[in-house]
Image (spheres, grey):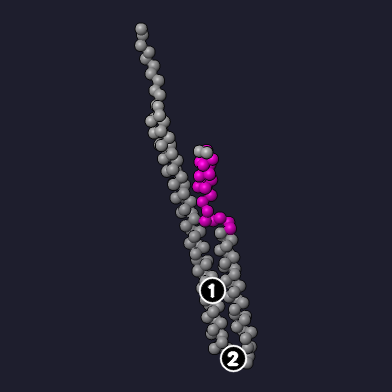
Amino acid sequence: MEKNDTVVHNPGLMGGISSLGKSIFGLLVSRVELAALELSEVRNHVIELVAIFAVAVLSIWFAVAYGTAMVVALAWDAMGWKILLIMFVIFLLVTAVLVAKGLSMLKQNKLALPATMKELKNDRDMLL
């Protein structure tokens, strides 16, 4: 009898599990790398959003400060309570504009991780 020189390697159950583990680990590493890239972009948007809301808070405090200062500084005989209302409305409008800007950033999903979420959804769909 002649010996067959061709050998077929069948990895078996343990080889298949090992290969699956390596593939899952590689997939996990690539998703973490993608999330890290997107988080660097999101970080800039978070800083901008925090600055906008900080200015909005500062603006409302100025509204309170001006309202209090107006009571002392202005003569009630000249304009009465109307100047207080004017300063209040001005700073209220500034605050509303800044808050609207911040909310529009949130609605535009500038803090989301779209590519990472898409890939994770694709992975979930493929595994299920």
Image location of residue 5, percent across then percent down = 37, 15
The residue located at (42%, 43%) in the rendering is: 29
Give 37 or 4, whichever is nearer the viewer. 4
Residue 57 in picture, x, y percent from top left: 52, 71
Which span is picked out in magenta? 107-126
Total count of labels: 2
The quarter of the displayed image where residue 72 is located: bottom right
Q: Is residue 34 above or below residue 102?
A: above
**Residue shown at the point (61%, 72%) measured from the top left:** 93
The part of the image, by quadrant, that contains residue 109 is bottom right
Q: Position of residue 77 (x, y in %)?
A: 63, 92
120 inside magenta stretch: yes
Whether 111 is drawn above or below 64: the answer is above
Looking at numbered disc 1 in the image, what kind of residue is underneath it?
Answer: Ser
Q: Is residue 28 above or below residue 99?
A: above
**SS type, badge 2:** loop
Provide the residue designation for mark 1.
59
Rounded to the nearest whole Å, what is the CA distance between mark 2 and mark 1? 24 Å
Q: Which numbered circle lies on residue 87?
A: none
- Which amino acid is tagged 2? Ala
Residue visible at 56% across and 63% down in the picture:
102
- SS majority, magenta: helix
Quarter that holds the N terminus: top left
Q: Position of residue 71 (x, y in %)?
A: 56, 87
Q: Earlier in the sequence, mark 2 or mark 1?
A: 1
| Residue drawn at the location 40% of the way across and 24% of the way down | 10
Locate residue 81: give its quadrant: bottom right
User: Does the magenta segment cover residue 27?
Assistant: no
* Residue 75, placed above or below residue 63: below
For mark 2, what is the residue? 75
Determine whether the residue tagged by mark 1 lies in a helix, strand or loop: helix
